[in-house]
Image (tube, coloured by chain):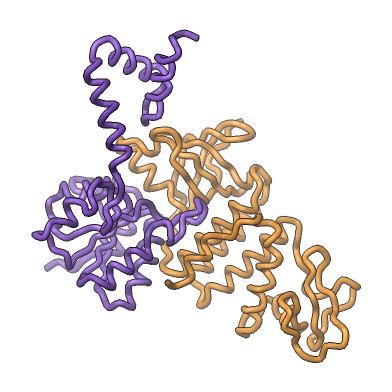
Amino acid sequence: MYHEFEPAYLLHSRPYRNTSAIADFITLNHGRVAGVVKGVFGKSRSAQQQRGVMQALQPLLINWRGRGGLKNINKIEMAGSPCILRGNRLYAALYLNELLIRTLQSDEENSYLFACYQQALEGLNSADNIEFPLREFELNLLQELGYGLHFDVDIDGDAIENSKVYQFDIDRGFMLIHGLPEMPSSVDAFLGTTLLAINNKNWADESVRRDAKRLLRQALRPHIGTKPLRSRSLFQKR
Amino acid sequence: MLFSPLIEQLIEALRCLPGVGPKSAQRMAFHLLERDRQGGLNLSETLRSAMEGVGNCEQCRTLCELELCHICANQKRDHSQLCIVETPSDVLAIELTASYSGVYFVLMGHLSPIDGIGPEEIGIDQLLARLKTEDVKEVILATNPTVEGEATAYYIAENIKALGITVTRIAHGVPLGGELEYVDGGTLAHALSGRKIVE
């Protein structure tokens, strides 16, 4: 099976043997594709150029051969200007890559997720607050993994109401908490107003952003495995 | 089994070297056994003492068998300039240019969350402790111009800012003797965004 000029982004690469690399890509039509890129760490001028091209956050076109397991990636070309990010925005992009490596299975076709990734990178480049693109990407990722959340109805099928408090259950969704007029301190409780704001992608309020972060961390936890995400430590100052 | 166990073992052991497959390992083993027994013994002794004796320099973390490497111990060098690099071979590369006379700090890698390499693994705490106690005026970030290298540079710069030390980053650009036509787009984009006023 030969695939030509498939739009892709590099998620991660590591040296393999003497001069080769094993690289993980997210592609438009074939989901995550992992393969061997031969000779990329060699000393020749063409190898050096290929190293320059084979960078994360840069739109690429790749050719590969093979089915199942590791592919043989034999051509990588640039397909646009790289996304040059700095500081927290760069760490956030590394977080996206780590999230995808942890959650995506190989060769599962998903062109919508590719578009979401592209959009998130653009968002990280241009948005005023990096939390907007990050939260939107996390929501889309959950949706595409088949665990999308419904922010407008609770588990009984009733509409979520602004004034009520709901408890989040990873397996089932939002459950109305009865007889609690004030915001409880429990970590899995969320205000109806917050849920509706998330549903409308209205991130203007800081408390909505904070709660969305808390909620999505809980929702993503079963998918990323037991090890904590290392890119989160980059955001902490020493 | 093609060879006696000890020869087999030697061939297998030689294969831990980079670029050495079964055939080259076999050639090396037979060369040592047939023609250069003394060289083989020297190799084994040196290998053992290097493996046991070489550690990391206490100040800059580069590989060396003494407490301080020869660069850190050299008082003639400018200790107010600190160049941060990823690997010991980067130190060598900069030393060969003969245009830098300060001291180094070797991270022994770069930040790479997916590989599980965070700030602790690249010795950020040791670096910050060193900057607090020593009189360093300029920190030069010479990590590789890759996404991870950039992230590492920003992370270090951000954490140093509070100490009031000048932080600089090495320039990226077109190689000497290169032709623009053949330079990749990414490098050219960096070269353009980092252009300088002609004086």
Residue A150: x percent and y percent?
79, 69
Residue A45: x percent and y percent?
30, 38
Which residue occupies the extreme bottom position in the image? A181
Looking at this view, is B71 or A34 the one in front? Answer: B71
Which residue occupies the extreme left position in the image? B76
Residue A89 sits above or below residue B6 on the image: below
Q: Is residue B79 found left or right of A33 in the rendered image? A: left
Chain B shade = purple
Residue lying at 35% horizontally and 43% vertically, measured from the top left: A49
Q: Is residue A25 found left or right of A77 in the rendered image? A: right
Residue lying at 16% horizontally and 60% vertically, measured from the top left: B102
Residue B54 sits above or below residue A234 on the image: above
Q: Can residue B108 be seen? A: yes
Q: Quadrant of the C terminus of chain A?
A: bottom left
Chain A shade = orange
Residue A209 sits above or below residue A53 on the image: below
Looking at this view, is A60 or A90 the one in front? Answer: A90
Residue lying at 37% horizontally and 39% vertically, measured from the top left: A41
Location of residue A166 by image quarter: bottom right
